[in-house]
Amino acid sequence: MRKLLLSAITVLLYSTGFTQSLSYYLPTNVTYNPSIPVPKSVIGHEVGEFHVSHDRLVAYMKALAAANPGRIVIDETGFTYENRPQLLLTISSPGNIKRIESIRQQHALLVDPQRSAALNTADMPAVVWMGYSIHGNESSGVNASLLAAYYLAAAQGATIDDLLEHTVILLDPSFNPDGMNRFASWVNTNRSLNVQVTDPASREFYEPWPGGRTNHYYFDLNRDWLPAQQPESRNRLKKFHEWNPNILTDHHEQGSNATFFFQPGVPSRVNPNTPKRNQELTGLIGNYHAKYLDSVGSLYFTKEGYDDFYYGKGSTYPDVNGSIGILFEQASSRGHAQETDNGLLTFPFTIRNQFITSLSTLEAARNLRTELLNYQREFFVNALKEAAASPVKGYLFSDNNDKSKAAILLEMLLRHQIDILPVKKTITAEGKNFEPGSSWVIPAQQRQFKLIKGIFEKMFKYQDSLFYDISSWTLPLAFNLPYTELAAIDATAFGDKLTSANKPAGEIKGGQSDYAYAFEWDDYFAPKLLYSLQKKGLATKTATQLFESGGRKFSYGTILIPVRTQPAAAADVYKWIGEAVKETGVTVYNLSSGLSRSGIDLGSNSFASLRQPRILLLSGNGTSGNDVGEIWYLLDQRFSIPVSMVEVERLPFTNLSRYNTIIMAAGSYFNMDKNVQDKISTWVSAGGTLIANEEATQFLRRAGITKVIFKKDESKKDTTISLPWFSRQDEQRAKDMPGAIFEAKMDITHPLCYGYRNSSISIFKSNSLYMDRNNGPYSAPVVFTSNPLQSGYLHPSNAALVKNMAEVNVDAAGSGRVISIADNLCFRALWLGTNKLFVNGIFFGHLVR
């Protein structure tokens, strides 16, 4: 079969033209059913002539399913933020399609080590998930999905019949519908129609900010497989765990001057929790890609550039779930045809390579079927053996007075098929009490042990010092929750497995009040509750000192809502709070008296009046799309707080007096001229709060708006050392901060640290910014410890730089203040533990004197 298909591919027509017919792409060793619609008949153009839009892609996939229901079942697995459907085509032989649910259920037994031994893998089809263009502007993949779907629907003969009989193919034509449509619109709009322009400087090849790479909120979905905070990821994971594919392909693009990459990646950069057999099978599958690409003369490379370390990517998440993840990286034409170092690169050529490697994957799955099925079974059997041998028998954590944040973590773990047991009697470990109702254990002895280890363990030793993505992502640290490793598990201390993560139900304890209400700032959704009340016009205050009322002790940052001074009747205040409590899950307390049993009374000046945030978030050229999107997502999706995104170029024409808070996400701000800098400085002096993140802090220092001092590596290089020239790039990259976790200490009495009960916090750092503490003893409320590394890779040259440095600095400027934050406290919607630290600047920044 392989020889037949390879010889067919070899005779594919080669052309330098920009528009190709199907004969350019399709194998000729099969015939094609004329009743199956070709792509052009539905999308209106040849594949590769234009970039297909998402609506036409969907129309074509549905037309195929309607034309050949014997081979194809199509599902809408969910919808994106922009309400575009996500599709999944299940493709197999007519006989398999008739019993597809029983095949799925039988295949699911392979991942159950208690039941998988009885399965006869010789009689089971392999399951292959083919996924295209998770980065929307890497569109050769999504356009190749048209060809893959047509081939699988229309091809006839012994070759295709044998393939479909022995495989179930899950075809996901677009991992990122919103991003791909944004990009398709740009390149189709800006291409010349009569004469194709191939000049790399042409507008067609330079899409505007934020580009089509990301989804609606500018999230990189290829980093979201593990966090799964975006709907595209959640919808996909549900189906992934229903089917547990043996292979998952992830079709990407790289720089235009490259060739084609397929895995294996760099051998020394494989996550140690990934079995060696995984990489062996990846190599065997790679042999098929090589032969298919050789047959058409396409250049390629392997085992360099890309790695298999971070489990949040499409090519690595399968590796820790008993599957084989395969990354493809095609040199990008960026538009329709572009001059490159390797000659003219046309869009049809890039599509053909993606299609060819789709076929090579299927051929590999067919021929390696039993090896893949047996490997999947052995993966989970071995996981239990490793768990039994592991000194860690479980991971215990508690909610740390924040039930909402804990519920988000529990939901996340359940999404990955991880078993969780609630604590039913108090456990004391490492000096902490883990109480029933607020604590849970993740037992090691379960089939997902490898994934659990991969996301709960701390790492300090690495085989390599280079990383394609981050070096650590320990979840309890990301959520800033107390946790510990258990050397033994007492079964009597835990209840039955959780089946769902129940969101906390808020309430007004004590019922309606005619005097005041209060709620603590600990809960993750407290900012959402506060803003919802401010939006109703209610006056709110925050406690800058401790107090005790109604038999309860309240901490710094507690929100007070007086009743009598509001511009609404007491009954309306009660109603509004009740509605907001139901929506957020936060508990509010009835306070019947202004006299405190200890601490400040309710009429004290130590209750500071709050203002409703009016936020401008700088965006556009000069800013990081990912960072802007993460802030936008946090405020809009998490807390329902409106934010005006204003591009830097619009600032000269923007009335800043409309806002009391300006946020500068990471970015160079190269396009902010001196007049605009002065305008912002004047606005701050008039009472505004300016919050700057990451590189934006450096910009403000250079602009003279802050006095922040940055520390640099001043160690002298040893000029006697001679290194080989080829290693120069890796030597420099090894000194970068690849994304590691560091401990900092907070002043929990400081307004920027309200809502935290423990002074320790875990900060995710992925840059080389080191801020000195400046402006006196009260200006740096968050400072890294003297031994800060908690998990991740840290180059020795950076070790001395990060310790005792400030994570947050505050500068006074007239009546306003500038809050400089060295790192991204909203990282990937995963680092929930630092979200409140960021939001505190919005709500309480004006209180800092």
Image (cartoon, grey):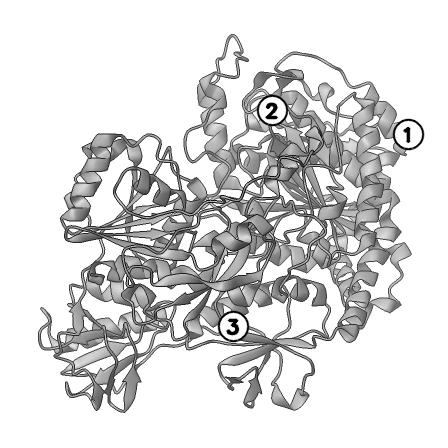
The reply to whether callout 2 and callout 1 are in contact (CB within 8 Å) is no
Front residue (pair 390, 638) = 390
**What's the amino acid at mark 1?**
Lys
Q: Quadrant of the N terminus?
A: top right
**Does 306 appear above or below 397?**
above
Q: Nearer the viewer, mark 2 or mark 1?
A: 2
Q: Nearer the viewer, mark 1 or mark 3?
A: 3
Residue 78 visible within the image? no
The reply to whether callout 3 and callout 2 are in contact (CB within 8 Å) is no
Point out residue 386 in the picture as x, y percentages from the top left corner.
78, 69
Q: Which residue is mark 1?
A: 3
Q: Which residue is mark 2?
A: 256
Front residue (pair 805, 601) = 805
- Secondary structure, mark 2, is loop
* Crowdedness near tag 3: few (<14), some (14–19) or many (≥20) residues, C-alpha within 10 Å: some
Mark 2 to mark 1: distance in Å?
Answer: 31 Å
**What's the amino acid at mark 2?**
Ser
Mark 1 to mark 3: distance in Å?
Answer: 52 Å
Mark 3 to mark 2: distance in Å?
Answer: 45 Å
**Does 777 appear above or below 554?**
above
* Crowdedness near tag 2: few (<14), some (14–19) or many (≥20) residues, C-alpha within 10 Å: some
Q: Which residue is mark 3?
A: 501
Residue 494 visible within the image? yes
